[in-house]
Amino acid sequence: MKPSHPLASLIENNKRWSDKRRAADPEFFTRLTRLQAPEYLWIGCADSRVPANEIVDLDPGELFVHRNVANVVVHTDLNCLSVLQYAVDVLKVKHVMVVGHYGCGGVAAALNNLKLGLINNWLRHVQDVSQKHAARLGAVRQGSPRVDRLCELNVIEQVANVCQTTVMESAWERGQDVTVHGWIYGLNNGLVRDLEIDIAHHEIIDSARDKAVNAVFAQDAMQA
Ligand code: CO
């Protein structure tokens, strides 16, 4: 690649990174080519400010990742479902984290009904979440507080969606040890917040969801 190529600096970065990794651990890449055995599946937003591995300080090989706009899990999305199935059935991950983030542009667009074209069809799923909780969400102060509450609710509902897939149902039916969690990341401080929804078997989906949703709205009452 010529130095004038617009991507030359990225290729340079890559070479430096590869050299650095090998200098620190000569077997690093050889080990990775033989095996990937991550314990975690991260389902997160595609937002460039939410780099999965970096946030939880994990190396290549340690985190299986699926990202899309607004970290949505739809029961007809073969892409997301295939990632989930491979992670659970083949890699046997122990934990699936749905990770939203505050200030999510997709969630804000859904809430404010922005007309952005094709992506509105995708964000319709977030609008479903918003409508489901419209009564309580409407009582939250407009602007970023309401967007942030919807970011949290969206994580909780997507956790429930993960749990209701055939993949999770079958895994739990055969007694596999795998738990689904809901997290939200703060762009302003780089910190992950646990939304305290942890589901390890089918029977508790509804109760865990209701409890987490109540906690979302309870924090507003505390702040008011
Ligand atoms: Co986002």
Image (cartoon, helix red, strand yellow):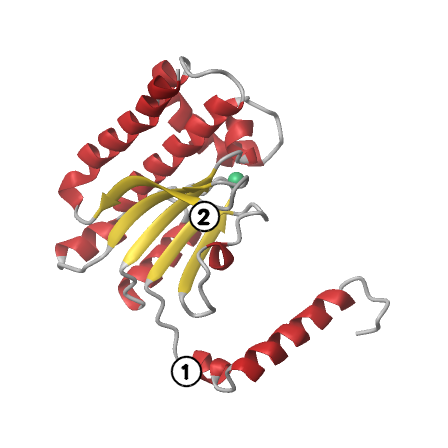
Q: Position of residue 193 (x, y in %)?
A: 39, 42
**Relative horizontal placement of residue 53, taking residue 47 as reference (left or right):** left
Residue 125 higher or lower than 164, as above or below? above
Q: Position of residue 160 (x, y in %)?
A: 28, 39
Q: Regarding mark 1 in the picture, which secondary structure is present there?
A: helix
Give the distance between the C-alpha atoms of the residues marked 2 and 1, in whole angstroms.
27 Å
| In-front residue for pair 164/205 | 205
Quarter of the image for residue 198 reads top left
Quarter of the image for residue 39 reads bottom left
Q: Is mark 1 within 8 Å of ligand 1?
A: no
Quarter of the image for residue 32 reads bottom left
| In-front residue for pair 85/223 | 223
The 10 Å Cα crowd at callout 2, few under 14, some 14 to 19, many 20 or more, is many
Q: Amino acid at mark 1?
A: Arg
Q: Regarding mark 2 in the picture, which secondary structure is present there?
A: strand
Q: Residue at x 61, y 26 (%)?
A: 115
Q: Which residue is mark 1?
A: 34
Q: Residue at x 32, y 67 (%)?
A: 91
The 10 Å Cα crowd at callout 1, few under 14, some 14 to 19, many 20 or more, is few
Q: Position of residue 210 (x, y in %)?
A: 23, 29
| In-front residue for pair 132/208 | 208
Residue 141 seen in this snapshot = yes
Q: Which residue is mark 2?
A: 44
Residue situated furthest right in the rendering:
4
Residue 15 higher or lower than 202, as above or below? below
Q: Amino acid at mark 2?
A: Gly
Residue 52 higher or lower than 134, as above or below? below
**Relative horizontal placement of residue 172, taking residue 9 as reference (left or right):** left
- Quadrant (top left, top right, bottom left, bottom right) of the N terminus: bottom right
Q: Residue at x 27, y 32 (%)?
A: 212
Q: Position of residue 207 (x, y in %)?
A: 18, 33
